[in-house]
Amino acid sequence: MIRRHARGFSLLEVMIALAVLAIALAATVRAVGEQSRVQAVVRDAAIARWVASNVIAETRLSERFPATGEREGQTRMAGRVWRWRRVVSDTPDGDMRRIDVAVYAADAPAGSEDSLVRLSGFASGRDRRE
């Protein structure tokens, strides 16, 4: 009696293998897309933090003791335009002022409260030579 041995895979085995591969590839593509989105959010937050730091530093350098009030402006950094809002307020120490800066993407709606970053700093009214 002669026995025949089947060689290769059956059609069902090939279809199951392709289904598993398709599911794995779809999950990989989704993970890569999500990672790209997260990277863009982190990049924008880091640049916005630099913009806020620069606004605080410029305020300290240009105004010895900044006046209280609110001011808005735009800054170009990393090839993009960023909107910022600066609020200078009094503190319990009469020789100090608080500087709060919120930074927004330029395409964010005006009056939007969804800032990318908020940063605070302080300015002293004392003579810097002391």
Image (cartoon, rainbow, N blue to C red):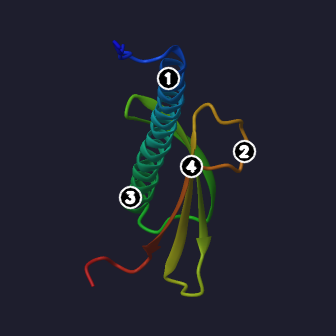
Q: Which residue is mark 3?
A: 57
- Residue 20 to residue 62: above or below: above
From the top left corner, tell me how far across and down residue 13 is, in percent. 49, 23
What type is the residue that disc 1 sits on?
A: Glu
From the top left corner, tell me how far across and down residue 55 is, in percent. 45, 52
Q: Which residue is mark 1?
A: 13
What type is the residue that disc 4 sits on?
A: Leu
Q: Measure how far apart labels 1 and 2 are at the Cα level.
A: 56 Å
Q: Between label 4 and label 3, give the one nearer the viewer.
A: 4
Q: Between label 3 and label 1, give the one nearer the viewer.
A: 1
Q: Which residue is mark 4?
A: 116
Q: Measure how far apart labels 4 and 1 are at the Cα level.
A: 51 Å
Which of these two is toward me, 13 or 108? 13
Q: Quadrant of the N terminus?
A: top left
Q: Earlier in the sequence, mark 4 or mark 1?
A: 1
Q: Quadrant of the C terminus?
A: bottom left
Q: Earlier in the sequence, mark 3 or mark 1?
A: 1
Q: Between label 2 and label 4, give the one nearer the viewer.
A: 4
The residue drawn where x is 71% and y is 35% is 109
What type is the residue that disc 2 sits on?
A: Ser
Q: Measure how far apart labels 4 and 3 are at the Cα level.
A: 19 Å
The residue drawn where x is 54% and y is 30% is 23
Q: Which residue is mark 2?
A: 112
99 sits to left or right of 58: right
